[in-house]
Amino acid sequence: MTYCCGILVRDGLVMVADTRTNAGLDNVSTFRKLHIFRKPDRLLTLSTSGNLSISQSVVSVLNEGVENPETGELETLVNAPTMFQAAQRIGRAIRRVYESDAPGLQAADISYEVSFLFGGQIKGGPMRMFMVYPAGNFIECTTDTPYLQIGEHKYGKPILDRAVHHNIDLYDALKIALISMDSTMRSNLAVGLPIDFVVVRRDACIDELTYRIEPGEPYFSDLRDRWSAALRAAHIAIPRPPYAGKRG
């Protein structure tokens, strides 16, 4: 299991992903799930969730490319003309890997579980973010709901629902994403450090900040302690329910 979160606000994009993979209680490993594609005219981010072998195969297909039978062009993620067409290429790569691997996976009784968060900007076009499903179809982030999640999302969703809006400061969005990640880690051992994140400012087409949070990193440790203390203080400050002694 994993947890990845993307937030697209007025000033730019934040994407955060953990690195833990779990194939049993005694087989826990670390793999990068946040991939960054850089070219002078674009900055693309892709985070993965689900079966590691499938997601790695999809990323490899996107890097190596698939020949378009009509034009003969080798279509990769980084030569897509628009963000929408890039998202379509991710969907086609997922279906291509499925066609190749599904029979073997089904024979081994392994489900085809994989999903992607894809965001960024190509110069001359808008900054966009998509969630791509195992079938290759996708949805797009909107100003009304400016975040998307994949993986073990339920524990980190409440803070996003309450705190994230389109006009929030970009680095406040990063802070909330990290709180969301901490909430998930607190409740699910299948999500864990290190954490990778990237911050991309709108129209810059470069990653303003790319960073990995390792165990014991001072800021994240302080954030975890402060958030726990703030929650305890909040519930103490709220009056107790006035229902004692009353019967419905």
Image (cartoon, rainbow, N blue to C red):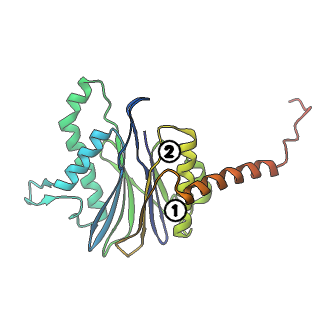
Q: Nearer the viewer, residue 36 or 84?
A: 36
Judge whether 184 appears above or below 201 on screen.
above
Task: Describe residue 118's horizontal placement relative to residue 241 as left or right.
Answer: left
Counting labels gives 2
Query: Which x, y percent locates residue 63?
Result: 20, 55
Callout 2 crowding tier (Cα within 10 Å): few <14, some 14–19, many ≥20:
some
Query: Which x, y percent locates residue 143?
Result: 50, 64
User: Tag 2's secondary structure?
Assistant: loop
Judge whether 87 appears above or below 168 on screen.
above
Q: Would residue 155 be seen by someone viewing this image from the given angle?
A: no
Between the C-alphas of marks 1 and 2, the distance is 16 Å
Mark 2, residue position: 153
What residue is shown at x 8% (from left), y 53% (from top)? 69
Q: Amino acid at mark 2?
A: His
Quadrant in which the C terminus is drawn: top right
Determine which of the numbered discs, if any, sits on residue 174 in the image. 1
What residue is shown at x 71% (from left), y 54% (from top)? 230
Task: Describe residue 129's horizontal placement relative to residue 184 as left or right.
Answer: left
Mark 1 or 2 closer to N-term? 2
